[in-house]
Amino acid sequence: MICNDLKSILDIKKTLTRQTAILWLEFKCFGSSTDEDMMKNTICDTKIDISDERTHHEKRVERLSAHKNRTLWMSYLVSAKQTLNPNQLYRYRNCHNYLLFRYYPHLQKKKLHETKHCDIHLLCPMCAIRRAARQVQRYEEKVNILLKNSPKLKLYYVVLTIKNQENLLSAFQHLIKSYSLLSARRRQALHYKKTQNLSSAYAKDSVFSNVVAGAYSIEIKRGKNSGLWHPHMNLLLLTEDDISQDKISKEWESITQDSYIVHCEETSKNQKVKDALVEIFKYALKYSEMEADDTFLTYQTLRSKRLFGSFGGFRGLDIDIDDNDTYEHLEYVELFYSYATQSRKYILTTDGELETAI
């Protein structure tokens, strides 16, 4: 059974590459306490013992097998409910049918080089992890650029909630509308600073008035006992001034009219920003905690909705997250895994010879 509760990563050190971000996000969906210790060691150590790497790699393949098993099981339910069109269903069923890893002896690392993607992230945990990891790496680079240009900026991790509701779409729309009003206050506050226009004066004391840049994503949960939907918004904010939890709580309640519960935490400019980004962009759903029918309903309700975004200084920063240059010209051995339906796991079918990337 997939794990339920997962520990935070606030004590992990060093830099998250996209590969380690992917691995950590895999753990967040299907990890264990043993995997947590292993993940910490992987992220902390740039060079690891080859025997540890083999163990780590095998556990990763096992986790991917668990993902694939869930996807195949879900595909039959999706087909019965006619949730996807024939082309989407084909891509969904064949997502991650194979895994092509490259082992780099010089770095003592195995990197997932190629596989198939369905990109239906609200139904597919593997594509959700891939999508989230790309966002983590992209926004980590953006944060670094903004901090380099303005070292005095402060970083905050913020969670905005609303009152739980029976209807998912209604709850989602309420959250989005409330956030839009808060975002509009920021724009009006900036307008007032520039023009002193009295029509914008109402927003000058908004919590968001000094926010330079922000990124957000929406996470969906459903209470196991209550059955109520609980969408909430995770944000990373770069600001010129302190943000008071009491102040943002009062402003948020004045907008939502039903929720004053927020989380507001200043993060350091080294590791904790990476932790916050993982929390923000991890995935919209916790597949291990979502019933199949709820997953279908969430997909049908939110598949055309925007679940993450950014504003302010993050806009216009184009980041290339292709890390292939790091491995260019390095010798490697290709490891090809095929998914075996009968054994319900990935099987190593080809163990290649040493080659050099072109």
Image (cartoon, rainbow, N blue to C red):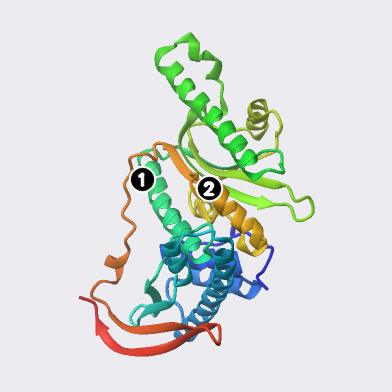
> Which of the two labelled residues, at mark 1 and mark 2, occupies the earlier sequence position?
1
- State which quarter of the image contains the N terminus: bottom right
* Image coordinates for residue 219, horizontal then vertical, percent: 59, 49
Dot 2: element: loop
Name which residue lies at 55% across and 71% down: 67
Would you identify the image quadrant in which residue 28 lies? bottom right
Q: Are the two marked residues, 1 and 2, in contact with CB atoms closer than 8 angstroms?
A: no
Q: Amino acid at mark 1?
A: Ile
Residue 145's label in the rendered image is: 1
How packed is label 1: few (under 14 Cα within 10 Å), some, or many (20 or more)? some
Dot 1: element: helix
* Image coordinates for residue 39, horizontal then vertical, percent: 54, 70
Compared with 69, 221 (above or below) is above
* Camera-nearest residue between 154 and 341: 341
Compared with 25, 234 (above or below) is above
Name which residue lies at 64% across and 40% down: 171
Q: Which residue is farthest top?
A: 198
Q: Which residue is farthest left?
A: 358
**How many numbered badges does the structure rendering display?**
2
Would you identify the image quadrant in which residue 108 lies? bottom left
Compared with 182, 34 (above or below) is below
Name which residue lies at 55% across and 27% down: 181
Locate residue 319 relative to residue 207 in the image: left or right.
Answer: left
Q: Which of label 1 and label 2 is nearer to you?
A: 1
* Camera-nearest residue between 119 and 82: 82
To which residue does mark 2 refer? 268
Q: Amino acid at mark 2?
A: Ser
- State which quarter of the image contains the C terminus: bottom left
* Image coordinates for residue 199, horizontal then vertical, percent: 49, 11
Q: Is residue 160 visible?
A: no
